[in-house]
Image: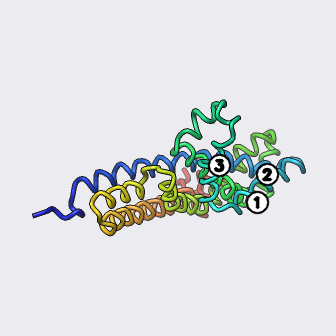
Amino acid sequence: MTEPLLFSGILWLAILRGLQITFLLTILSMAFGFVLGTALALMRVYGSAVTSYLAATYVFVFRGIPLLILLYFLYYGAPQLTILRVTPLWTFVFSSAFATSVLAFSLSNAAYLAEAIRGGILTVKKGQVEAGFAIGLTTRKVISRITLPIAMRNCLSQIGNETIFTIKASAIASVVTVRDLLGQAQYVANIYSDNITPLLAAAVVYVVLVQIVEGLTRWAGKALTISPDQRTKTKNPNLFQPVH
């Protein structure tokens, strides 16, 4: 009797391999997107009129381009530029479907994260910034030690949502031959002529990944939230200590 594909080690080994690629694609593109997005947000808030305009233009363009078109352009279109083939970009990026996918996702993520981080920066209270200057901090230190940490806490849910979007959208990478979670599921489906079981297995894994990220986002939000009682204890550390 033939073993059902759902319980086959071949299916789940392929799913595991695809999961590793999906995880790596998500982590790298979120990391690169976060760095670029933070820079863009700072340019929009603190930059000159020119740099602010350039950052706003980047956000406008890359939020407007569908991710699939961006991926197609970078993987199929950009390599047609002859000059690109003699640069390190061809060797390290455009010759690899995975690296090109990371680039496409990073550029797209940066646009959305830039808006989320900019919104977080704008929610920082003026008094908190002024307090930093009052104790002698430079503008750079005020931004790095006060503004950005508070902004990141304020936009944590948006960052979590973007991570979830990236996990699900990473399936698009399979159209340029990346063997991610969906790519591996399709590979098994073609071998066994079963288009249901592998895709259902992949769908379940995607759901689990999304739930994990949602849980981590909620946990981080609670961990970074300072309650009024904690603020009181921090400002008055001896308030509840016995008087001798």
Which x, y percent locates residue 218? 50, 63
Of the 4 image quadrants, the one containing the N terminus is bottom left
Q: Is residue 218 left or right of residue 185?
A: right
Is residue 145 among the parts visible in the rendering? yes
What is the distance, in whole Å, between disc 1 and disc 3 at their CAs? 22 Å
Is residue 232 among the parts visible in the rendering? no
Crowding near the residue tagged with mark 2, few <14, some 14–19, many ≥20 C-alpha atoms within 10 Å: many
N-term-proximal mark, 2 vs 1 = 2
The residue positioned farthest toward the left in the image shown: 1
Crowding near the residue tagged with mark 1, few <14, some 14–19, many ≥20 C-alpha atoms within 10 Å: few
Crowding near the residue tagged with mark 3, few <14, some 14–19, many ≥20 C-alpha atoms within 10 Å: few
Look at the numbered disc 2 and give the secondary structure of its residue: helix
Q: Between 46 and 234, which is closer to the camera in this rendering?
A: 46
Question: Disc 2 vs disc 1: Cβ atoms closer than 8 Å?
Answer: no
N-term-proximal mark, 1 vs 3 = 1
Q: Is residue 46 left or right of residue 191?
A: right
What's under tag 3, amino acid-wise?
Answer: Gly
Scheme of image coloration: rainbow
Circle 1 is placed at which residue position?
A: 60
Look at the numbered disc 3 and give the secondary structure of its residue: helix
Circle 3 is placed at which residue position?
A: 77
Which label belongs to residue 219?
A: none
Residue at horizontal 63%, vertical 31%? Answer: 88
What is the distance, in whole Å, between disc 2 and disc 1 at their CAs? 9 Å
